[in-house]
Each structure stands twice: as C-alpha cells, then as structure tokens.
Image: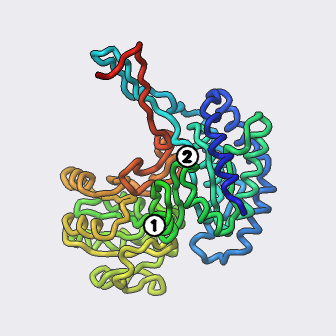
C-alpha cells in the first residue's frame, strides 16, 4: 500500500487548517460531541467486536472497553476543549530593535502530529479535538486491538467535518496493519512530530526507530511515600484511590513506601485495599506485620522485580524505608518520572520531596489519580509526557504549539 498519499494529503491540509476561525473550530467540536453521543449504540457495537478479541484479564481490556458513560465523558471533554481559549497567535515576545525592526514571537501549530497508540479508542477523539483546536492535522495509527472502535469514532468525526465543509484529511486514521506503523515512523518531511501512547515496549520501539522527532508519553511507575508524620485517614483514602480508581491507567499507584516509624499503622493504612481485592507484594518488614491482618490469599512476599513494575492491575508493592532520604533514593532508582506523591504533615519534608523528586507531576497529600489533562483544566490530553523537551506532564493545547519569529521592517538591510 502506498502510505505516502496519506501523508501528502495531511501536509496539504495543514496549510489551510490554521486559517479556520475560532468560531468554526469550536462549532465543529460541539457538533462532534453531540454526534458521538448520538452514535453511542453504533460505537459500542463496534467496540464489542474488539473486546471479543481480547482476554478480559488482559490489563489493556479496561482501556479498550467503552460504555455509554465513557462516551459521554469523551463528549464532555470535547465540549471542554471547545470552551478553552485558543493558544494560537499569542504574542509571546514583542520588541523593536534600535534599527526599527519590529520582532514578535508568535505561537503557531506544530503542523502534522502523528500518534501511535494501542487499546485506547478514546485517544481517537481526544487527539483530534486537541489537534483541531490548535490548527494541527492529526495522523493516527491505532492498534489492531481497537481497530473497529477507532474506525467507528473516526467515521463520526469525518461526518461532522464534511457537514462543515472541512477536508476530512485533517484527520487520517491509518490502517491497523503493522506496515502503517513503519511508514509513519519514516514519514520525515510530512509529519512534524510523533507521539506514542501505550506500553513501555511500544514507546521504546517508536523512540528507537522513528526518523522524525518523538515526544515520549511514558509508562507510569508511580510511588506514594507515607511519611512519619502522615495523617492516617488521609493516607488510607489517598492510597486506596490512587490504586483502585482505575487500575489500567498510567497514573495508578504501583508502590507504597512507608516510614518505619509508622510500621504499626500499616495494617490500618492498607486495610481498605483488602476490600478492593488488591494483591500486595510486601518486603520482609511489611510482610511480617501484614501477615496477621491482611487476607493471606492477597499477600505475597516481594521479589526485586516487583519494585519498578507498572502493574496496570490490582497489584501493589509495599516497602518500608528508614526515612525520607531512603524514600527519595528508592523513587530516584525506580521512578518512570510520571507521578509521585508524599503523605506528610511536615512542611520541611513536603518541600524537600516536591523539590527533589524528578517527575512530571509531584503531589503532597493528594492522589496521583489527578494526573490527567482534563483534571488539570486542559480540557483533554494528547498524552502525559515524561521527558523534558518540548513538553512535560499532561499535554493540552499549549503543548501542541510551537512559535515563529515575525519580523517587520521598512527596507532595513544588514551591514
């Protein structure tokens, strides 16, 4: 198959998309939100075809599964994006030089944004909305595990675009076959940036093989440290929420670190997890305390490989540390630099944790479950970047822009 035609059309569409008015852009997104809800039954029928191909115990199953409520949430995110101010055309810098050259630094779209993703059909709508709002063309490559769901959502998007007289080339959904991935990785000159969303193996593969710039949205190996002064009730609620709210997402908790001076509080701190059917992998000290209180069928002794693992399931590692310094060292060794939290009433310890932990999002006395574009007021997200160049953390509208220098003169020449 000749994939070049897809990329050529996308590049051509990017030249005209930026000229759409904000009113038109927002009207498309509002109409799309309504259209997705109106087509809920059709989308769910296609989603069932995908779910039938995946074992229910697969960690990706929950990410793949759609429901009427989840489609309504996607629609709400589209409406949120429509309600936000556009970051395009912002004057980031404005100055006049001694030679009277007027120089402005102005925000502009990235251009053509490619996204490779796995079992996340919501990404199809989320990425389109954010790209469209920022004048970017989206070229999407979903996995075969969500092929029918992605096609159904893309069809609704194309229908709405056609209704508004806008080229459907502003959203390209590539075939689910592997050859399309290889073509996208090599689409230099057509695609300006590539964003992988999925497993660590997918992200590594894209980073190592792409011929175009990559923004990593990395896996989440997430820790919460319960400090010596941590409030027990806050800790119970935060840890339970961070682990069980939705286990298949990248901000889900993977490891609890507990100050050894609170060892006796461990059974109470973790007791809600037993009700949530969470399986623990406890180090020697924590296992010794928990074995008399935590359900035996849910309690295991930890092995080294359990630390530094993104579980994406109802499993959690537990480790006792001597103090904040050991907690910080453990996080530095095992963190994927996504989201990390401390539960403490000690202002100095909180400040040190927030300052020293190298992660896209750091929390004090709150669940890491909030690392999400919509929760951060971004409307939706294209991914959560764990790198430090071009963007970091939840990527919303502003992160999908670059800038250019606009220089106005009156005949000046350089000597």
Whole-percent x and y of residue 142?
64, 61
Relative vertical location of residue 398 with respect to residue 105 in this rendering, above or below: below
Q: Nearer the viewer, mark 1 or mark 2?
A: 1
The answer to whether residue 240 shows anywhere in this view is: no
Q: Which mark is residue 246?
A: none
- Label 2 environment density (alpha carbons within 10 Å; few <14, some 14–19, many ≥20): many
- Measured in 3D between alpha carbons, the distance from the residue under mark 1 to the one under mark 2, in whole angstroms, is 28 Å
The quadrant in which residue 232 appears is bottom left
Tell me the SS state at disc 2: loop
Q: Which of the labelled discs sits on residue 380, or is there none? A: 2
Which residue occupies the foreground of this view, 12 or 161? Answer: 12
Image-quadrant location for residue 30: top right
Question: Quick one: SS at disc 1?
Answer: helix
For label 1, the crowd category at 10 Å Cα-Cα, with few meaning under 14, some 14 to 19 and many 20 or more, is few
Q: Nearer the viewer, residue 40 or 132?
A: 132
In the image, is 139 to the left or to the right of 1?
A: left
Quarter of the N terminus within the rendering: bottom right
Placement of 97 over or under 84, stated as above or below: above
Residue 399 percent coordinates (x, y): 46, 43
Residue 281 visible in the current orientation: yes
Give the percent coordinates (x, y) of residue 11. Answer: 62, 44
Nearest the viewer among 323 and 182 is 182
The tag earlier along the polypeptide, 1 or 2, is 1
Pointer 1 residue: 208
Residue 80 sits above or below residue 65 on the image? above
Residue 240 lies left or right of residue 223; in this view the side is: right
Q: Do the numbered discs 1 and 2 sit on residues whose CB atoms are within 8 Å?
A: no
In the image, residue 176 lies at what x, y percent? 69, 65
Name the colour scheme.
rainbow
Q: Residue at x 36, y 68 (%)?
A: 269
- The relative height of residue 50 versus residue 171 in the rendered view (above or below) is below
């Amino acid at each position: 198959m000749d994939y070049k035609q897809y990329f050529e059309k996308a590049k051509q569409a990017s030249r005209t998309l930026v000229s759409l008015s904000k009113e038109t852009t927002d009207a498309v997104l509002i109409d799309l939100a309504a259209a997705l809800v109106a087509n809920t039954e059709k989308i769910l029928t296609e989603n069932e075809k995908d779910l039938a191909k995946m074992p229910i115990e697969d960690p990706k199953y929950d990410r793949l599964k759609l429901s009427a409520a989840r489609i309504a949430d996607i629609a709400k995110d589209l409406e949120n994006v429509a309600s936000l101010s556009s970051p395009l055309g912002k004057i980031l810098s404005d100055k006049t030089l001694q030679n009277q050259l007027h120089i402005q630094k102005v925000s502009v779209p990235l251009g053509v944004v490619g996204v490779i993703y796995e079992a996340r059909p919501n990404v199809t709508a989320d990425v389109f909305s954010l790209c469209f709002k920022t004048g970017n063309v989206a070229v999407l490559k979903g996995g075969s595990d969500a092929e029918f769901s992605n096609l159904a959502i893309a069809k609704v998007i194309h229908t709405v675009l056609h209704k508004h007289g806008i080229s459907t080339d502003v959203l390209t959904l590539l075939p689910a076959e592997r050859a399309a991935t290889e073509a996208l990785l090599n689409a230099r000159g057509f695609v300006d940036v590539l964003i992988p969303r999925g497993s660590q193996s997918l992200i590594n593969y894209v980073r190592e093989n792409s011929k175009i710039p990559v923004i990593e949205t990395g896996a989440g190996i997430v820790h919460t440290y319960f400090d010596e002064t941590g409030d027990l009730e806050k800790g119970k609620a935060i840890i339970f929420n961070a682990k069980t709210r939705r286990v298949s997402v990248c901000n889900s908790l993977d490891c609890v670190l507990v100050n050894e001076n609170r060892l006796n509080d461990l059974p109470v701190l973790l007791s809600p997890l037993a009700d949530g059917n969470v399986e623990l992998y406890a180090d020697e000290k924590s296992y010794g305390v928990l074995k008399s209180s935590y359900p035996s069928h849910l309690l295991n002794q930890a092995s080294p490989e359990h630390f530094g693992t993104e579980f994406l399931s109802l499993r959690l590692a537990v480790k006792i540390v001597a103090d904040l310094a050991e907690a910080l060292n453990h996080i530095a060794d095992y963190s994927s630099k996504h989201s990390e939290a401390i539960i403490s009433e000690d202002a100095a310890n909180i400040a040190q944790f927030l300052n020293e932990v190298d992660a896209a999002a750091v929390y004090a006395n709150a669940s890491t479950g909030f690392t999400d574009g919509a929760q951060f007021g971004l409307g939706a997200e294209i991914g959560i970047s764990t790198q430090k160049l071009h963007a970091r953390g939840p990527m919303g509208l502003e992160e999908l822009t670059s800038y250019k220098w606009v220089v106005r003169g009156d005949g000046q020449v350089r000597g």
